Image: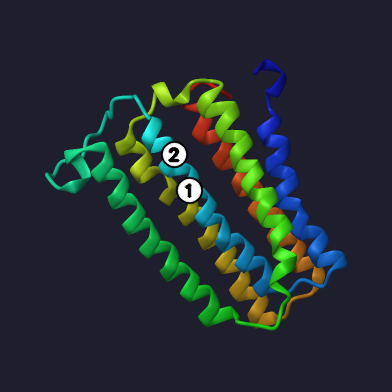
Amino acid sequence: MKNMKRLSVVFLIISNFIPLFGVLFWGWSLFGILLLYWSENIIIGFFNVIRMTMAQGNDEYPMSFDSIYSNSKAGLIISFVILYGIFTSGHGFFVFKLFGPHDIPYDILVIPFIAIFISHGVSFFENYIGKEEYKKVSAQELFRQPYTRIYIMHLSILFGAFLIKAFGAPIFVLVLLIVLKTGIDLFSHFLEHKKFGTI
């Protein structure tokens, strides 16, 4: 696994810069970018369920109420899928309602979607498995973890998207939006893994 050190960072940057080519060479619109970034929520949720299944750590801040959340790991995972699914659906409705739909060839999003999936997969195997983060984190902590990153990332992106919609969407502004998202992803990546001492 030593040979894979920082490989997840490389894949993160590559997967984030594919939309840059979409804007510069394939005529991607603002909606196409936002739709791709929204779809990353699904990937994050998918890997988080796997992480929760494998988690062996003890939560420093256990949930203070009795419910399906705290009765069992299976109940916690089911609850996460339901609540995260509602959140993701609501977020998707928000993106479509305010910025689309537009006539874009959805098949062009397949490759960047796969690239983002691979990026998260590499991080999963490099850090969570290879560096044994699963021994240090609890399912309860993972239940809460995705939302912080998503809130920061998408509030920043949506703020930029509103400005673009209000003042137009020249290519350089779309490029800045992509760079902003990449920077937030890198910051979140290092922050997440630094607390485990794996970065």
Q: Determine the residue positioned at 46% across, 56% down.
A: 151
Which residue position is annotated with label 2? 50
Mark 2 Cα-neighbour bin, 10 Å: few <14, some 14–19, many ≥20: few
Q: Determine the residue positioned at 44% across, 47% down.
A: 146
Mark 1 Cα-neighbour bin, 10 Å: few <14, some 14–19, many ≥20: some
Residue nearest the observer in this picture, 171 or 137? 137
Residue 66 pos. (x, y %): 11, 44
Q: Residue 172: which quarter of the image?
A: bottom right
* SS assignment at label 1: helix
Q: Amino acid at mark 1?
A: Phe
Residue 47 pos. (x, y %): 49, 43
Q: Is residue 84 above or below residue 92?
A: above
Q: Determine the residue positioned at 60% across, 48% down.
A: 184
Q: Which mark is residue 46?
A: 1
Q: Residue 5: which quarter of the image?
A: top right
- Describe residue 68's horizontal placement relative to residue 38 as left or right: left
Residue nearest the observer in this picture, 43 or 63? 43
Q: Amino acid at mark 2?
A: Ile
Q: Is residue 129 above or below residue 120?
A: above
Name the quarter where the N terminus is drawn.
Answer: top right
Residue nearest the observer in this picture, 102 or 178? 102
Residue 97 pos. (x, y %): 51, 81
Q: How is the image coloured?
A: rainbow
Q: Are marks 1 and 2 in contact (CB under 8 Å)?
A: yes
Q: Determine the residue positioned at 38% across, 56% down.
A: 84
